[in-house]
Image (cartoon, rainbow, N blue to C red):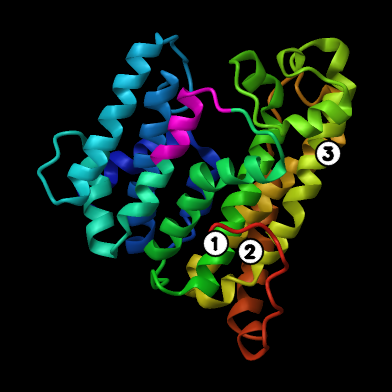
């Protein structure tokens, strides 16, 4: 393992236990590349939020954040241009991006998503929320697909990878509604908030907790068709990559189900999955991947539903 891969793995194990567990199922080369890509994504997200590995948020003034954002754009373009990188996160990203042929547009679209946070973007309707989800998660999904060997021109498979990213982000939004609201970030559509009678500035208020639970349930339900669509992308992946993706799908989907099950108490503490549940979803992911490598490869996949898509 290279030094860059080792540093990336360490940061992922500290910053995202769910991703680390799923990544362990990849073959060694794919795992190293996936971890290096994810470590760069994590680094960029943390830089904007003033965090370290998703924790210990430090308040940054708007000017600081704008300078950080400009730096992320510049460093990302510099890395993709093949220029020498001193920051390990960007050096790791450069290595995997150039080796795997990750299109610059997708990397920049991820940074665009962070720019939406910096600008305090609001989302008038569900499609607007999905556009945000594309930037911060769908784009990651398609980059990860390329790391797993999917050709950048294989739109059929890439749309399924995009769908998994969208499903993950809808689940994340549901889990973090209150925490995000406390930090002045609201990703729910304004139209949904109006229907629920919850002012955007009061999402974190205790008196609206039952209404927020209804909104979270709506988000989790909205993620379901994207999870179902994403499963049909597994047939195009090598078995171990399909296994890792199927395991991650199961774990994240379980988080959404847990948010719904907890109802109005879902934000009393952070909703997560137990080690035993992760192991169960990983085992089930293996069976799903096996099906994808056998039965599904000989079947004509169903057409992708008429869901929102950036690709």
**What distance separates the C-alpha of mark 3 from that of mark 2?**
20 Å
Q: Is residue 236 left or right of residue 209?
A: left
Which quadrant would residue 249 be assigned to in this image?
bottom right
Q: Is residue 153 magenta?
A: no
Q: Residue furthest bottom?
A: 298
Residue 223 placement (x, y as % from top left): 72, 50
Q: Foreground: 179 or 66?
A: 66
Which quadrant would residue 208 be assigned to in this image?
top right
Tag 1 near tag 2, CB within 8 Å: yes
Which element is circle 2 on? helix
Inspect this view and state whether residue 13 appears.
yes
Please give the residue where the numbered disc 2 appears in the rendered image: 230
Q: Residue furthest left?
A: 84
Asked if 260 appears above or below 242 in the picture, the reply is: above
The local crowd at label 1, few if under 14, some if 14 to 19, many if 20 or more residues have their Cα within 10 Å, is many
Q: Is residue 144 left or right of residue 235?
A: left
Residue, x 57% and y 51% (percent of image)?
A: 165
Asked if 84 appears above or below 207 in the picture, the reply is: below
Q: Which residues are magenta?
A: 111-121
Residue 84 placement (x, y as % from top left): 10, 43
Disc ID at residue 217: 3
Residue 301 placement (x, y as % from top left): 67, 81
How many numbered marks, from 0 up? 3
Asked if 298 appears above or below 240 in the picture, the reply is: below
Residue, x 21% and y 50% (percent of image)?
A: 80
Please give the residue where the numbered disc 1 appears in the rendered image: 161
Residue, x 67% and y 87% (percent of image)?
A: 300
Residue, x 49% and y 71% (percent of image)?
A: 155
**What distance separates the C-alpha of mark 1 from that of mark 3?**
23 Å
Which quadrant would residue 164 be assigned to in this image?
bottom right
Which element is circle 1 on? helix
């Amino acid at each position: 393992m290279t030094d860059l891969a080792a540093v990336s793995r360490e940061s992922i194990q500290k910053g995202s236990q769910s991703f680390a567990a799923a990544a362990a199922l990849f073959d060694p080369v794919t795992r190293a590349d996936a971890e290096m890509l994810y470590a760069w994504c994590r680094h960029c997200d943390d830089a904007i939020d003033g965090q370290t590995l998703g924790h210990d948020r430090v308040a940054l003034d708007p000017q600081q954040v704008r300078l950080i954002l400009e730096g992320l754009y510049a460093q990302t373009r510099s890395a993709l241009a093949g220029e020498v990188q001193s920051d390990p996160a960007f050096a790791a990203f450069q290595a995997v991006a150039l080796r795997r042929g990750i299109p610059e547009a997708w990397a920049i679209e991820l940074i665009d998503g962070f720019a939406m946070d910096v600008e305090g973007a609001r989302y008038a309707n569900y499609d607007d929320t999905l556009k945000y989800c594309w930037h911060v998660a769908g784009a990651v999904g398609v980059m990860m697909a390329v790391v797993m060997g999917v050709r950048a021109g294989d739109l059929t498979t890439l749309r399924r990878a995009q769908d998994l990213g969208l499903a993950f982000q809808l689940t994340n939004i549901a889990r973090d509604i209150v925490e995000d609201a406390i930090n002045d970030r609201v990703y729910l559509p304004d139209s949904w908030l109006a229907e629920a009678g919850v002012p955007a500035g009061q999402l974190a208020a205790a008196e609206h907790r039952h209404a927020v639970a209804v909104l979270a349930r709506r988000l989790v339900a909205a993620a379901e068709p994207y999870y179902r669509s994403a499963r049909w992308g597994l047939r195009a992946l090598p078995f171990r990559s399909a296994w890792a993706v199927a395991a991650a799908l199961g774990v994240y989907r379980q988080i959404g189900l847990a948010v719904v099950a907890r109802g109005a108490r879902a934000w009393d503490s952070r909703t997560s999955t137990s080690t035993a549940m992760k192991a169960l979803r990983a085992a089930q992911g293996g069976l799903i991947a096996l099906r994808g490598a056998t039965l599904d490869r000989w079947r004509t996949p169903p057409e992708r539903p008429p869901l929102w898509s950036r690709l």
